[in-house]
Image (cartoon, helix red, strand yellow):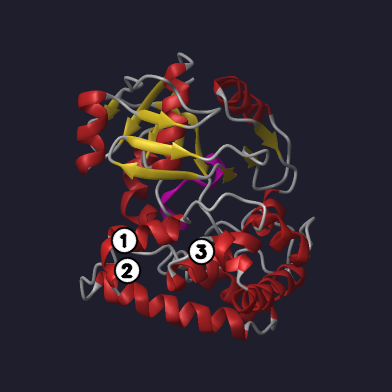
């Protein structure tokens, strides 16, 4: 299987690194300082279990330097970055190739291949003009949920938090368990990332959304980890209200995650204090991934008549923060936060 990891940030870099170390035919697409670091010195993975003692000499290229076709394209971009690269990534697929989309939140394809009155509905917060639906072959798409806390400490160096919940969950959009899912598992799992096949990938996405749909925007706004938010009683109450709304919207489309809000908050309070990807983006001055992880939940609630006032407040505040970063060029670096 020829594999392309398109977007070698923290989690994409981790996957590309362990696959390379396992001898898989894998290429990583990166840019800027991340490309320079990996091309010159290799990829450094730090972690008690999933780390590696020496830099991994990965095969890395820039966009446009790939050598297609690829049997599997693993998209490591944030959800709001996919549209700009969708046509290019689709052109890299082999005949019958697969595209694994494991972004946080609700995907643009949520209502595709689904036995529901809402089949064909578009989530405008994720795919505003329909570019993704029109560009990416729907039969190529594999849904995914990536559970692996990772922090891009500096270009080419990724710090990993090893937890019992670490796993890659993959599933077909029509919920079938297929040979191609088994093929992906057979390559990735031996490399060091447990792979679970799901007959309901949407339910798995909602479960993770209970966490990152709440703690990612709150973490960005408070400059705090999920652990810190869960430990402080006032923010824990707010997080609980937001989580109740996520669960209510999920129920409106027939999904009941296998974890309650109280169980999720208790789980968060047992976690390491690694910063969310959204807070990392704030610190690096990058556009925030809000459409899929919070705005899409509000969108679904509007389709089904379920109000989400706490989520709307968090979305508005995080949206203004994002606007200041993107339009005003305001930097919220760790140093500036400490001085403030």
Q: Residues within 10 Å of mark 1 (few under 14, many from 20)?
A: some
- Secondary element at image label 1: helix
Q: Residues within 10 Å of mark 2 (few under 14, many from 20)?
A: few
Q: Looking at the image, can residue 94 be seen?
A: no
Disc number at residue 334?
A: 1
Residue drawn 42% across the image and 61% down it: 279
Residue drawn 32% across the image and 49% down it: 85
Labels 3 and 1: the sequence-earlier one:
3
Note whether 118 is above or below 20 in the view shown. Answer: below
Does the residue at mark 2 contact the one at mark 1 (Cβ under 8 Å)? yes
Report which residue position mark 3 lands on.
Answer: 216
- Secondary element at image label 3: helix
- Mark in front: 3 vs 2: 2
Q: Looking at the image, can residue 188 be seen?
A: yes
Note whether 330 is above or below 182 in the view shown. Answer: below
| Number of numbered markers | 3
Of all residues shown, which one is farthest toward the top? 23
- Secondary element at image label 2: helix
Q: Looking at this view, is 121 or 283 the one in front?
A: 283
Position of 225 compared to 4: left or right?
right
Q: CA distance from mark 3 to mark 2?
A: 17 Å
Q: For residue 325, what is the image quadrant?
A: bottom left
Q: Magenta region: which residues?
A: 133-143
Residue drawn 66% across the image and 58% down it: 269
* Residue 315 is a magenta residue: no
Q: CA distance from mark 2 to mark 1?
A: 5 Å
Report which residue position mark 2 lands on.
Answer: 337
Residue drawn 20% across the image and 70% down it: 329
Q: Where is residue 38 drawn, in percent x and y?
A: 27, 30
């Amino acid at each position: 299987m020829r594999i392309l990891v398109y977007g070698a940030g923290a989690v994409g870099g981790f996957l590309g690194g362990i696959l390379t170390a396992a001898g898989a035919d894998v290429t990583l697409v990166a840019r800027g300082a991340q490309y320079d670091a990996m091309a010159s010195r290799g990829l450094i993975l730090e972690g008690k279990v999933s780390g590696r003692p020496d830099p991994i000499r990965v095969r890395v290229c820039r966009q446009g330097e790939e050598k297609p076709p690829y049997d599997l394209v693993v998209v490591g971009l944030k959800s709001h970055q996919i549209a700009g690269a969708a046509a290019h990534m689709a052109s890299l697929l082999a005949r019958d190739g697969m595209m694994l989309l494991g972004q946080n939140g609700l995907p643009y394809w949520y209502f595709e291949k689904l036995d529901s009155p809402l089949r064909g509905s578009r989530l405008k917060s994720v795919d505003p003009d329909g570019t993704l639906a029109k560009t990416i072959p729907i039969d190529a798409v594999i849904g995914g949920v990536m559970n692996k806390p990772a922090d891009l400490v500096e270009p080419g160096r990724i710090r990993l938090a090893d937890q019992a919940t670490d796993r890659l969950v993959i599933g077909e959009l029509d919920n079938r368990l297929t040979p191609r899912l088994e093929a992906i598992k057979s390559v990735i799992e031996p490399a060091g990332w447990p792979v679970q096949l799901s007959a309901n990938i949407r339910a798995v996405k909602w479960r993770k959304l209970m966490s990152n749909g709440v703690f990612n925007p709150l973490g960005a706004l408070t400059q705090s980890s999920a652990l810190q938010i869960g430990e402080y009683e006032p923010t824990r109450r707010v997080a609980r209200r937001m989580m109740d709304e996520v669960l209510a919207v999920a129920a409106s489309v027939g999904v009941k995650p296998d974890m309650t809000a109280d169980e999720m908050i208790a789980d968060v309070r047992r976690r390491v204090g690694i910063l969310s990807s959204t807070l990392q983006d704030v610190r690096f001055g990058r556009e925030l991934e809000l459409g899929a992880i919070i705005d899409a939940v509000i969108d679904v609630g509007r389709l089904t008549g379920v109000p989400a006032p706490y989520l709307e407040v968090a979305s508005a505040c995080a949206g203004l923060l994002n606007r200041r970063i993107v339009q005003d060029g305001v930097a919220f670096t760790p140093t500036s936060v400490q001085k403030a």
